[in-house]
Image: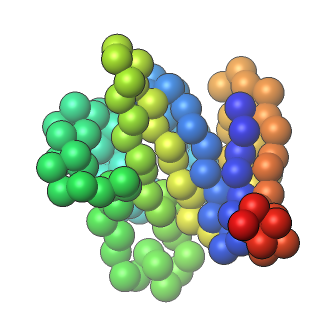
Amino acid sequence: MTLEVDMGKYKSVKVPLDVAERLIVDVSKRLNIESKDVMESLRIVRNFDEFYEFQQKKFKDYVVPDKDISDMIKGAVVVDSLKLIKEGSSREVVVTFDRRVNESVIIDSLRSLGFDVEVKRFDLMQLLKAK
């Protein structure tokens, strides 16, 4: 399992649909946060097919769960966005965590779910070399 950390310090991980819900719940429990974005993310994951269709109809790559302004001010946002992927019978979710979520919490959560974790960081120099 690869945890990608981008230049903005947002952390993303691609997991099977059945793991996505457990990952979001586990990370929020470890952070002791019950925020609107967590509840919305769980609703999106639990209703994958409906939100996948919505994502396709709107030509969007990501579904962004609603967030409370007060949660954003307090730093209590866990999930920034979700990307729903369907290929044949396979269903996967790219969970992008907020930049303030400590990557060690995500790594510990993934390990507790039985995954080996590799961290891949993207920085400006890598992007410039890619061009």
Which residue is at a point 40% across and 82% down the rendered structure image?
A: 70
Kindly give the residue lying farthest to the top in the view shown: 89
Query: Left or right of 81: which side holds 120?
Result: right
Residue 19 x/y as whole percent: 51, 27
Which residue is at a point 52% across and 70% down the rendered structure image?
A: 76
Which residue is at a point 55% across and 32% down the rendered structure image?
A: 15
Residue 49 in view of the camera = yes
Give the image's coloring scheme.
Answer: rainbow
Residue 31 x/y as whole percent: 62, 56
Residue 112 in view of the camera = no
Among the 4 quarters of the image, the one containing residue 129: bottom right
Q: Quadrant of the C terminus?
A: bottom right
Q: Quadrant of the N terminus?
A: top right
Query: Left or right of 56: which side holds 102?
Result: right
Query: Left or right of 3: which side holds 18?
Result: left
Could you say which is closer to the camera, residue 32 or residue 52? 52
Where 52 sits versus 129, above or below?
above
Residue 75 x/y as whole percent: 56, 76
Where 76 sits versus 74, above or below?
above
Residue 123 x/y as whole percent: 79, 69
Could you say which is closer to the camera, residue 13 or residue 35? 13
Where 51 sits versus 131, above or below?
above
Which residue is at a point 79% across and 57% down the rendered structure image?
A: 121
Among the 4 quarters of the image, the one containing residue 7: bottom right
**Number of residue marks:** 0
Query: Left or right of 36: which side holds 76?
Result: right
